[in-house]
Amino acid sequence: MLCCALGALAVAGCAESSQTRVQVPLEVQGTSAPGTPIETLGAVPVTLTRADLAFGPLYLCAGAQAGGLCDTARLEWLDTVVVDGLDPTPQPAGELYGVSGLVQSWMYDLGISAQLTSTEPYVLEAAEALGGNSLVLEGSAVVSGVTLPFVAEVRVQQTDTTELGVPVVRKSSSDVFSEDVSGREQALQVRFDPATWLRTVDLRPYVEFRTCAAIPSAADAGVVCDGLVEWTCDAVDPPVSRDCAALGQVCVAGQGCAERVVIAPGSEAARALRNALTSGTRPTFTWVEASE
Amino acid sequence: MRPPAVRESHPAAYPPAALAEGREGHVELGVVVSETGVVDTAEVLVSAGADFDAAALEAIRAWRFTPAEVDGRPAMARIRVPFDFLLPEPEPEPAADAQPEGAPPGSDPDVPVSGDASDAGEPDTDVTATEGEGGPGAAPGAGVGEDRVSAATDAAADELADDEDVIDVTVRGQRDLRTEERSVSDFQLRRDQLRAAPRSEGTEVLRAAPGLYIGRSEGPAVAHNYMLRGFDAEHGQDIAFRVGGLPINLPSHIHGQGYADLGFLIADVVSGMNVSAGVSDPRQGDFAVAGSIDISLGVGEDERGVRVASSYGSFRTSRQLLLFAPRGLSDQSFGALQYTRTDGFGQNRAGQAASAILQHGTEVGDFTLRAIGVLHTARSDLAGVLRRDDIDAGRVCFTCVYDQPTARAQNALSSRVMVGLFADYRGERGDSGQLGVWLGYDSFRIQENFTGYIQSSRTLARVAGRGDLIEQQNRTRSVGLVGRYRTAPMRPTTWAHGTLELGIEGRMDGITQQQSLLDAAVRNQTWDQRVDASVRGVDVGFWADLDWHLTQYLDVRAGVRGAVLSYDIEDRLGNFVPVVRPDDAFIMGFRRSALGTAFGPRVSARVTPLPWLEVLAAYGEGYRSPQARLLEDGEPAPFSKVRSGDLGVRITRDDTLELTLGAYYTRLSDDVAFDAAEGRLERIGATQRVGGVLNAVVRPLDWLVGSLSVTVVGATLRSPPPPSAEEPFPPYERGQRLPFVPPVVIRAELGASHVLRASLGGHPLTGRAGVGYSYLSARPLPFDQAAAPVSLLDIGLSLQWRALDLGFQLNNAINTRYAAVEYNFASDWSPDDGFRSRTPARHISAGAPLSLMVTLGVTL
């Protein structure tokens, strides 16, 4: 029995954890090539010239649900990077560190993190590079024949009224994501598609075809656009027009001649972008296996 | 001229074979006592056979004397020591057909003799000085008759006069003993072993226990961390501790099931220790999973008196001791008071502690009555744990504390009082028994932060990040009793004899406990409640134990142990579900009860093919009570079951060598491990251990004792809880090595005590030296991490002259930088850096660095 016991001891002593420390390269990539039109709400085509997204930190979780049920993550990447959404080439972002095993969900921030200890969010490096924003889009849309250059700057962060201390974007329950991470993976690729961000954005309200005659009362006097012509309407004085195109500008509804449309925080378009980033179609996570 | 006087006597063991065969003997030894008081030579003058002669010689070699004096100077002297080995006192006239054929009239050879006295930890053989002032029954310092002593300062033994003094010794086999060493993992530690290595505090006598490692990671107000043969017993969950008959483990304690704080121990009054690793003794009850340790208290005759000692050392650590042990009273009677304080070896580690132990024993007829009282209180600041990556990056130093209110507010306070009354009975027919009652009250409070800033309040909406300072409070009121009776020896045949013991043991505990989260930055404002519960638990244990000797080659012990456990739980936060249910839908709380029975056999066998060789096998099933708060209503088996088997050999050579080599297997149905998020133990599923134990004790010289203990174990997890929605990423997986358990534990101790100078101012100068070395191999941690191996060396030196003694003690002499404990879990101690790591990270609690203590004592 002594020999048996020592033999068993040898076997038991060799029993090792199946969990091992792993690190997996992380790559990020965009989707759309510059110049490729994207269709937004109302079949408005948009052509992007810039789609920069602040991405990170990223956590991969063992459970099917991330968020509050992922106090302990299996892998994490605690850095941030600006993703060029228009560059489909995978770009190395760093390494995910953690422990081997099954991952079934993920969550990440968009360059701005909210910690339990502070009601003020932390603007991390990538968002800092984007002027404190999570997303910066530049491009032009063609609305009713009017070409409308625009820029959108969006901050995406947890707030006091949402959920402090938890990353703002999580895998949706309909997404399929399951991988038994062994450390032999070549990389985890995260592909972002700016088209999904813009799909629900309605740019049509920025273009209007109105004249002062259409203004119902003096109280509504102000600036209106008739395509690219700006009209300043006054209850006493006659209307004054200005051809924005001649100035190399566009006429933005409610604003008049301007270099471009600025999608301001709090606007419907900004809210749509924010919602698209946090709860719309999520980026694609792909495990690239190392070749044997 | 003053004759030699017995300073320290050791009883002779009645040869088992002679006892079994009903033989008596008379041995006379001629003994030369050196100028230093040790036995220089001993020769058999009158023989009673090899076994009796050997027993007498073995005993006398351990005796110590105050040397004879000639003209005020120590001198060599020769004395004569007759040993009378007598069979036990005659029983009442037995039935004629029960009297063994050929047995001496009135004798009863059916008496086990090995091992300590079962009830009081007394020597295993009744040694009585029948005459002679300097006999073992006399007070130390009592000289033998001067007119019957010859002495010479430089003469050889054979030159000594023949009219040496006589010290008669009667060795009588005891009736009331049972076999204590039932498996190869059972050990009885003598005082010289307990004192061999330096001990900086009373609890460290446990380091002498083979296979046991103790560490202290949470300061003097919190129990040590214990590890025994593959069990990370945390604060005592897997080891049943008993001190002076008082059970120490606290059931359902919020800081750890079976919480056992031995901080009250005072090393000077520890007289012996029985270590029973594994489960083979029916007396082992709750928490005897890895084993049990019984510590007996007393002050030997040679150390009695009034002792005052003061120690001072590194980190402004000081210790004051007052020991009151009047000569003339029994070894069991003493009072001891100890106070310690320290600034601690790093930031936020200052602490104070005070202990008082009072015990009085007296004999009344067939009874030995003993009363014991223990008082203890301690408070200390705690540095808590540090992330290893923060240490490596220089963000915090190894022995520092995070510079945040939630970290600096870590501290602990504990208080305990216990009293007990025990009556030991020894009948004339050889039967014996014990009846005891005890009362206890324990109060415990701790503030600790393991995880930094990752908790959110479950009670208050939108409150989070105020620091995970966990406050735990636990108060336990206990009352218990123990009663047992062992029959007089029975002898159904000529080749078999033995006894039967029946016993009961019970306790009732009333426990209240709370766990909250505190905001240290706002005067410990409570910002979350996690536990608010009361538990009433009853544990009634009973056992039967047969201890039989079948020929001189085979001893068999068989018994059963049962227990009925019941719990009444009032969980005042039960059914609390934030947000989901409206407040007025029900009244919060979850009251429930559970009852179950634990039952298991305990068997062991010893084969003695040669006088110096024993083969031992043992198997037993035990149990551990649960954290009652985790029970469901009506749960029928509210305990964890342990199955344990041992097999090995023991080699004994006189008194110079005891070598044991064994293997064991232990399986536990439901283990627990530390959970940092809650700062307490949580279930992790079934586990098993397969291990081997080597233990050696050598006494090559009269003044030297050494011991070596090596435990090698493979501990694995059999069936951890599966992932759940609440715990999707459990740290434990089936088949993995059990976290925190070192596969190899080594302990080596060496102690020497010798007269350095026979006469200094007319009195001998005695020196003592001790070395203790501990090694823990790399310990696996959750999530594929491993804690670094630990090597610790302690060195002690002391001098004793007349009533004075001066000691120096170096702890961690090689100044190992080590982690007293190490964990691997997710935390966030840098809340202002903008991101939070969620993967498990290594955390350590620093172990004590090199320290020096100097002790000056006076014994009057």
Image: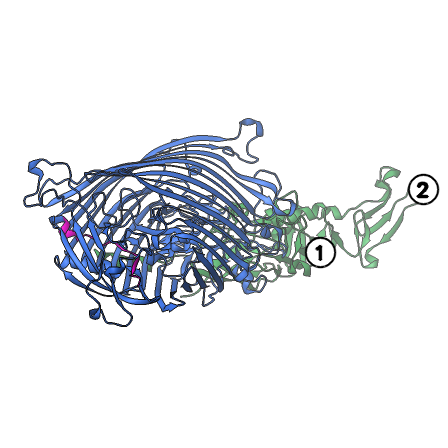
Residue furthest to the right: A236
Res. B299 visible in picture: yes
Q: Nearer the viewer, residue B43 or B422?
A: B43
Q: Give the residue at mark 2.
A: A236
Q: Nearer the viewer, residue B278 or A273?
A: B278
What is the secondary structure assignment of the residue under circle 2? loop
Q: Give the residue at mark 1.
A: A140
Residue B313 as seen in the image, left or right of residue A242: left
Residue B512 as seen in the image, left or right of residue B715: right
Residue A136 as seen in the image, left or right of residue B10: right
Q: Which chain is blue?
A: B
Q: Nearer the viewer, residue A10 or B492?
A: B492
Q: Give the amino acid at mark 2.
A: Val
In which quadrant is the N terminus of chain B drawn? bottom left
Q: Give the amino acid at mark 1.
A: Ser
Q: Which residues are magenta?
A: B1-19
**Marker count (numbered):** 2
Q: Residue at x 40, y 45 (%)?
A: B721
Q: Position of residue B165 (x, y in %)?
A: 23, 59
Where is B769 relative to B681, above or below? below
Is residue A221 inside the magenta stretch?
Answer: no
